[in-house]
Amino acid sequence: MIRTVAVSPFSDQKPGTSGLRKKVSVFRQPHYAECFIQSIFDVLEGMDGQTLVVGGDGRFWNREVVQTTIRMAAANGFARVIVGRGGILSTPAASHVIRKYGAFGGIILSASHNPGGPDEDFGIKYNASNGGPAPERITDAIYARSRIIDSYRIYETGDVDIDVIGDSFVGATKVQVIDPVADYADLMEGLFDFAAIRALIAGGFRLSFDAMHAVTGPYAVEILERRLGAPAGSVVNAVPLPDFGGHHPDPNMVHAKALFDRMFAADAPDFGAASDGDGDRNIILGRGIFVTPSDSLAMLAANAHLAPGYADGLAGIARSMPTSAAADRVADALGLPHYETPTGWKFFGNLLDAGRVTICGEESAGTGSSHVREKDGLWAVLLWLNILAARRESVAAIARQHWLRFGRNYYARHDYEAIDSAAAEGLIAALREKLATLPGNRIGDLAVIAADDFAYHDPVDGSDSRHQGIRILFEGGSRIVFRLSGTGTSGATLRVYLERYEPADGRLDYETPAALAGLIAAADGIAEIRSRTGRQRPDVIT
Ligand code: G16
C-alpha cells in the first residue's frame, strides 16, 4: 500500500559540489532523507514506467537509505529499480549501469572521500539518464522544492532482500538486484589491452592498490588480481567497511600515508595507486614519485592513444579551473580543443554528451573519459597500466619525458579545513574587493597580469555559472586560485591552489615546495590567510 506522509520541510537541503552531504545524525532525523528524495522525484518529469538505479559506497546508513529509496521509487511510479547487491555500486559503476540499462536516472548514496560511521558523513545525489551528476538547474530546482515540500510517498512493505542477485517486487515495481562489479569490469576490459597488462605483470611488474576499506575493493580484486593476474595482496585494504576502518577514504599524502611510505621505500613496487570512498577518485605513484592529479591528466591525455579504447585519438580535453594548465599544453600540442570549467564533475557532462571532449580531469584526484559520466578511479589506474605496458618504461621516466616535451607545471593545493565560516566568507569577499587593483602590481618577484572571479559560460546549453573561484594570474604562467570547498560538512574549507610553470628548457627537478615558495608567501600576503583564519599552516597539502 502506498502511504502519503505529511511533513514540514527542512531548510538545509542545498546540494553542494556533488549532491547533499551532511553528518549521519542529520540524515537520521525522521523524514530527512525521504524529504530530499521526494524533492528529487518531484522535480523530475516522466518517470512513470521508467527504471531507477540505486546504489552507494557501503558507508554507514547506506543500507537503510537504499531500502527507503526502493520503497519511494515504487510509490512514485518507477516500473523497475536496479540495485547493486548489498546496496553497493561505486559511483563510476552506477554511472555505467544507468547508461547500459537505459535508466531514467540514479540515486547514488555517498559522501565520497569524507569519513563514514554513525558520527561521520553521508550523502545523496541524483544522476540523470546520461549517467552524470544532475546539472545545476536541476540541483537548484531540487533545493527550491525541498524548502516547500509538504509530503512524500512511500510504499508500506518490509525490507527487500538486496543481498541476493535476482528479481522481486514492491507492488508492481520490479526490484532487480545485480552484481555490482561485473558490468563495470567488462566495460574496462573493452577499453584496455588486458593481454598486454597481464603480460607486464607476469613479467614481474609489481603494483600496489590501496582500496582504503572502501567501495573499490571488490572491483580492484576482480580486475587487478583475477582478470589481470596481479598476485593476491596487490590490493590492500580490500574489504569495504561501513566506517572505512576509522580512516578518511581520501587518497592523499595524509590519509594514504601507508601507500606513500611503501612507494618511497627502497623495495617499492613499480606502481602504486589508491581510490576513495565511492571509487571515483585516484592517485598515481611510481617508485619514488607522486604524479599530481593535474600532471596525471596531462600524461594520460598525451598517451591515451596507446589504449585500444582511445586508439583513434581524443576529441578534446577538459579540466576544472583550479586544475593546472598542464593538460592545455598537451591539447595545444596535439591540436585539440580544451575547456576550463568550474569545479564539479557535473560541468563536464554537456561537453562529453556533445562529443567535444574525450578526457576530463580535476586537481581533486579525478580523471575520467566519455566511457561514463563520472570520474573513475580504476579507469585511470588501468589507463596508466596500459600505457606502462605499451611503453615499458617506469612512471618516473614517463613523467620526465613529459616535462621535457611540454614543460612542467609545479603544483600544490593547500587546504585549511573546518575554519570559521564567517572568516572564510570574509576572506573571499575581501579578495573580490581587491581584484581590480591587482593587475600591474608586483608581489615579491611575481608580476600580476590578471585577476578575476571565475565565471563559466557553458558552450553547449548556454548556461552561466558565476563566482567559481578567485584567480590571480602572474606573468610566465604562474597562478594562485582561492575558493571555498563545496563538499565539507563542518565549517568552511579554504582551498588555495598554487601553480608555477617552468618551460621545457627550464629547471624541471625542483622539489615542489621550493618551486612554489614565492607563490605560497604571495598567497598569504594577498589573502591574509593567517590573520583571517587564525591558522599558521594548512591542514592538508596535496
Ligand atoms: C566532488 C566533485 C568534484 C570536485 C570535488 C572537490 O568530488 O565531484 O568534481 O572536484 O568534489 O570539490 P570541493 O573542492 O568543492 O570540495 P567527490 O569525489 O567528493 O565526489
Image (cartoon, rainbow, N blue to C red):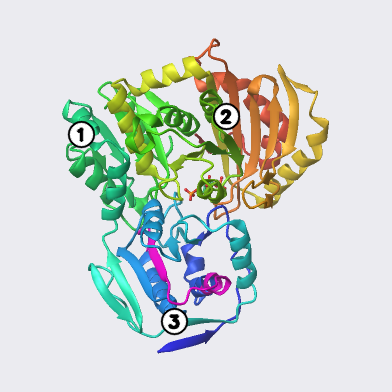
Q: Nearer the viewer, residue 158 or 55?
A: 55
* 47 is within the stretch colored magenta: yes
Q: Secondary structure at mark 1?
A: helix
Residue placed furthest toward the top: 505
Report the side of 322 relative to 48 (left or right). Answer: right
Q: Secondary structure at mark 2?
A: loop
Task: From this view, report whether residue 93 is shown above or below residue 176.
Answer: above
- Front position in the image: 339 or 32: 339
Q: Position of residue 401 (x, y in %)?
A: 42, 17
Give the labeled residue for mark 1. 198
What residue is shown with label 2?
A: 325
- Residue hosting label 3: 75
Q: Give the class, few, some or many, for how many residues have Cα within 10 Å of label 1's Cα (few <14, many ≥20).
A: many
Q: In the figure, residue 380 lies in which quadrant?
A: top left
Per the rendered image, the range of residues in magenta is 38-59
* Image quadrant containing the N terminus: bottom left
Question: How far across and down, in percent of the image, does residue 497 sit?
Answer: 60, 34
Q: Nearer the viewer, residue 208 or 298?
A: 298
| 195 left or right of 122 in image | left
Label 3 secondary element = helix
